[in-house]
Amino acid sequence: MDILTLAMSAGLSLCFLALLFRPLELVFPAKPGQPFFRPDWWTDLGFFLGQYLLFNAFVLWVLSGFAGWIDGIVPIAIRAVVAEQPLWLQIVEIVLLSDLLIYWGHRLQHRVEFLWRFHAIHHTAEHLDWLAAHREHPLDSIYTIGLINLPALILGFPMETLVGFIAFRGIWAIYIHSNVRLPIGPLRYLIGSPQIHHWHHYRDRDAGNYANLSPLMDLMFGTYYCPDHEPESFGLAEPTKRSWIGHMVAPFRRSS
């Protein structure tokens, strides 16, 4: 794929996401009055372009290699048993298993200093919206995407299916970071939402809400936290870099 095709794909993706999420942010704002071009918007655009122009292909390449390694160690008999199950049951199993893995993997990102070096970049965002969801170090992305898709890899789902699963998870991640507040009543204990995830970005490294699609894992393990109002502020307590390049190199310059 040449650079022109990549640039056109990135531009179309940017327009699609803006058209999808910006109206929601205007009609159902979590923080009313937050402008489209809020502080650090250009930095987050850099993260977006970095993902779409530089890192997405690399992440998928690493994941493909990992899938090949998994293929060599998972017994065929296990995959045969799984394949005989109804598709809906396979999907439920994958969602639950991937949510379990990413829950504990996410908690480790907040507890283990080496992992936090990279994951902290995501938490430097002081304003949340659909674009801020892309503020993520590429090595952190490999860790997260690998964990989320590990059950599907083990159970033998083809790479083409995994790409669709990754795309769905990506859209969901953008939604829960968006400047949207859609009260869903008791369903908030079953389905993830911006209302829940915004509290994960509160200025507290141990704020909770580590789950992904559903908050069930947080409820089970005592890390669910969702007051009825928005956090006063997002980001980190300590000073952070402001540029895209600064964020890329920051994990390698942190003191142990």
Image: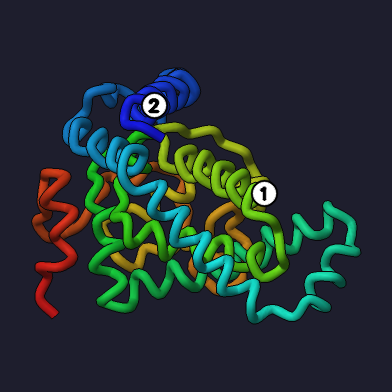
Please provide percent x and percent y for residue 66: 52, 68
Residue 192 to residue 237: above or below: above
Please provide percent x and percent y for residue 200: 39, 56
Q: Which residue is mark 1?
A: 161
Kind of residue at disc 2: Thr
Please provide percent x and percent y for residue 68: 58, 68
Q: Which corner quadrant holds the C terminus?
A: bottom left
Per the model, the C-alpha gap separating discs 2 and 1 is 23 Å
Q: Which residue is mark 2?
A: 5
Left or right of 243, for residue 113: right
Q: Residue at x 14, y 60 (%)?
A: 250
Label 1 neighbour load within 10 Å: few <14, some 14-19, many 20+: few
Sequence order check: which comes first, mark 2 or mark 1? 2
Residue 254 to residue 36: above or below: below
Q: Residue furthest front?
A: 2
Query: 72 or 42: which is nearer to us?
Result: 72
Kind of residue at disc 1: Thr
Left or right of 204, for residue 43: left
SS assignment at label 2? helix
- Picture colour scheme: rainbow
Task: Tell me the quarter of the picture where residue 48 sits.
Answer: top left
Left or right of 18, for residue 48: left
Q: Residue at x 37, y 31 (%)?
A: 6
Q: Residue at x 67, y 49 (%)?
A: 161
Label 2 neighbour load within 10 Å: few <14, some 14-19, many 20+: few
SS assignment at label 1? helix
Whether residue 209 is visible, yes or no, is: no
